[in-house]
Amino acid sequence: MADKSILNKKSLDFLESYLNNAAPTGYEWTGQKLWMDYLKPYVDEFITDTYGTAVGVINPDAPYKVVIEGHADEISWYVNYISDNGLIYVVRNGGSDHQIAPSKLVNIHTKKGIVKGVFGWPAIHTRDKSKEETPKPDNITIDVGAKDKEEVEKMGVHVGCVITYPDEFHILNGDKFVCRALDNRMGGFMIAEVARLLKENKKELPFGLYITNSVQEEIGLRGAEMITQTIKPNVAIVTDVTHDTTTPMIDRKKEGHLELGLGPVIAYAPAVQQKLRDLITETAEAENIPFQRSALSRATGTDTDAFAYSNGGVASALISLPLRYMHTTVEMVHRDDVENVIKLIYETLLKIEAGETFSYFK
């Protein structure tokens, strides 16, 4: 592939609308519809399932099946309890960070529409500095400006309403993408860009390609667990985010050294099939695509695990996008890394042969 930017205005316009749309775990369908509309010109057909995973398929009749995958959901909160004086207590939907909540604006999704609120916090003047409390799930509350519980309920708010942050997409310093839900809406975006490039460059693949945007990763890889039983793939290349470890309060001796702008991160873990990973690293070297390596103890914690251990074992690998400030509303990635993940998946697909077993014993 020519060494030039592969993201065009249409790509970036889609990315912005896709990120700005709320699609929390269990409620991903509006984001999936945006994603499918963008992907439609580049695939032959779609598969969807009961819980909302969406798959664009190229060459659906081919017996050998390759998955490229990201996940569509974002962390959020649920209304858990409404006090008599109209304050709302919450419970997590996924790995929402309680420490960033105070002073954040929120959207509460109701049948009557969006109800705006704020995570309040006691003023610094009123707190006991000798025993300063930190934000915790049981002491953070949302204020919607209501005088009591009855008024909250008249707004349409009830236990079980999902709560998201409204923070929208920004570009910092020309090449840093910042938003909530980059984990892992970026994965869905990058695999869609791979499909676009295959179509625009008129590449014919000798296998079926399943561009898979899974739901419910944030609560246990559940969407991938379901869809892999439907697809029954031979190979799965998963993309997710991983930590940039150069920011404060991260121990690089524990987390490794990974950094924005230095390229995709290729994972080493038991769930990662070594021969498939070798094909990816060799492709990166041959195509002059910068990359980093990460060693993961036991599970990867990503949809890679769900694919790898399904259907009697599926050759699976993980290519991650370095990201700062995970599970906050200011997640940050580098445009160069985004483009290089896309390039690496694209070029690897062109080197996979139909029927390849990646066996250690042949």
Image (cartoon, rainbow, N blue to C red):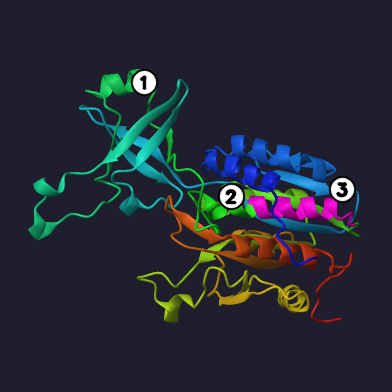
Q: Which residue is mark 3?
A: 60
Q: Is residue 341 above or below residue 40?
A: below
Q: Is residue 263 above or below residue 342?
A: below
* Closer to the camera in the image, 312 or 172: 172
Q: For the residues carrying marks 3 and 2, which lies nearer the camera in this image?
A: 2
Gap in Å between the C-alphas at discs 2 and 1?
30 Å
What type is the residue that disc 2 sits on?
A: Arg
**Quadrant location of the C terminus in the rendered image:** bottom right
The residue at 64%/39% (across/down) is: 32
Q: For the residues carrying marks 2 and 1, which lies nearer the camera in this image?
A: 2
Question: Mark 3 or mark 1, which has the lower sequence index?
Answer: 3
- The residue sitting at the front extreme is 174
**Quadrant location of the N terminus in the rendered image:** bottom right
Instruction: Give the image location of residue 35, x and y in percent.
Output: 67, 41
Q: Which mark is residue 185?
A: 2
Is 7 part of what is drawn in magenta? Answer: no
Extent of the magenta region: 188-203
